[in-house]
Structures are given as structure tokens and as C-alpha cells.
Amino acid sequence: MSLQLGDVAPDFVAVTATGELRFHDWLGEGWGILFSHPADFTPVCTTELGTVAKLEKEFAKRNTKVAAVSVDSAEDHRVWAEDIAETQGAAVNYPMIADADRKVSELYGMIHPNSSDTAAVRAVFIIGPDKKIKLTLTYPASTGRNFTEILRVLDSLQLTAEHQVATPADWEQGQQVIITPAVSDEEAAVRFPGFRAMKPYLRLTDQPKNA
Ligand code: BEZ
């Protein structure tokens, strides 16, 4: 069965372009993102890894480490990283996991044989400080991912982990949020003074500040 939200992200030891990585140790106490790409030296993947490299400070601000994985070798990753820096204008300073034996890809169900027997799909796993999976995404090889959306989800996950709120459709940082049904109106009046009830089940409040 595929990995589901709330499952513990499987631990592994892997080789990367820059050395060995012990996944859970590397994650430490913070948040993590593991994302797969179909193959090195391919165009969409080149733009994706470059985009993630450009967002390095955004992930760091959110106490989030990022690692890429594909079924290529560490040597291929090293050579391709130079192409990414040259064409995308950003150095890949995050781990590129070499998974030629498919150990990681199989642990995370990243190979979908009815799509491709040999290459991973574009999967994303967001992992919380408790090492549990908070989000999964699967895109086909032909469609590059929107990493701004992944940052947006990370913001929502981090906010809603700390406060009893949920974020509405298309929510962005700073916009109003929804008070979860678990909070009574009496409690909401104390915790979210001035909240607005459009319906008994749809109560909005300003975004609380994260610690
Ligand atoms: C790409 O990254 O461009 C790509 C990779 C595998 C299949 C199709 C496209």
C-alpha cells in the first residue's frame, strides 16, 4: 500500500552527490521535503531543481530541509548539477540522492509501473518534525511542479500545526483563516476575539502569529 498522510516517513541511508545521507538524522528536529524527478539531464527536471535551488532561503526561513531523488548515479548528479547552475542561475546546495538501486523510490512508491517502469514520477512528500508525512503530491513527467504552491502548503501546515485553524482555498500568508469546528464559539471568542461567523460552521479570523 502506498504511503499515506500520518504515516512515519521511512528512514533510509543513501548516497548523494556530496556524500552519505542518513535520512532521519539529516531531517533532525525540523521539517523536510523529499521530491523525486524522473531523470537527470532532462529539461523539465532541470528547471525544477533550479527553481528549488533559487528558493533555498525560503525553505530555510521555514526551517525546512529539501532533498531530491532519482534513479541516477551520484556521478550523474554531480555533472548535471553543473548544467543546472549554468542554465538556471542557481547552485544546487541541497542533497541530490542517487537511487540507482531504487531503494528509496520503492520505499516511497515513487515508481508507478503503469506510467514508467524505469523512472520515478514527480512525487513530493512534506514531512513534519515528528517525521510523519503531512502532504503527498504526484505529478506526471510532462508537468513541472509549482514550488511556490509547495511553499504555500508548507506555510499552511506550519500555521495549522500550531493553532486550531485551517486555511481556505487559495489562502496566502497574511489572509484570514478558518476556525476549526473543534473550537466552540465561547472558546473562539477568547482565542480569536472579533472572529466573524458567516455560518455556524464557517468562522473566519485574522491569521494568528506563529511562535
Ligand atoms: C523532463 O524532465 O523534461 C522529462 C523527464 C522524463 C520524461 C519527460 C520529460
Image (cartoon, rainbow, N blue to C red):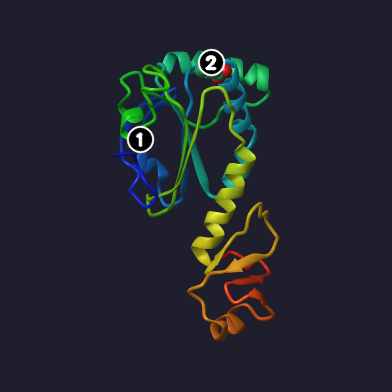
Counting from the top left corner in percent of width and height, residue 188 is at 58, 80
How crowded is the residue under tag 1: few (<14 C-alpha within 10 Å), some, or many (20+)?
some
What is the quadrant of residue 156 in the picture?
A: bottom right
> Which quarter of the rendering shows the C terminus?
bottom right
Secondary structure at numbered mark 1: loop
Judging depth in this view, the residue of 88 and 78 nearest the camera is: 88
Measure the C-alpha gap from mark 1 to mark 2: 24 Å
Mark 2, secondary structure of its residue: helix
Picture residue at 44% right of the left edge, 51% below the top? 128
Q: Earlier in the sequence, mark 1 or mark 2?
A: 2
Type of amino acid under label 2: Trp
* Residue with the mark numbered 1: 108
Instruction: Determine whether, in the image, residue 115 is placed left or right of residue 91.
Output: left
User: What's the residue type where badge 1 is placed?
Assistant: Tyr
In the image, farthest residue toward the front? 199
- x, y (%) of residue 158? 53, 57
The quadrant of the rendered image in which ligand 1 is seen is top right
Q: Looking at the picture, does residue 125 appear above or below residue 90?
A: below
Residue closest to the far bottom: 186
The percent position of residue 83, horizontal first and vertical second, equals 60, 15
Tag count = 2
Which quadrant does the N terminus fall into?
Answer: top left
**Quadrant position of residue 84:** top right
Q: Is residue 187 above or below residue 128?
A: below
**Viewer-closest of 22 and 129:** 129
Residue identifier under label 2? 80
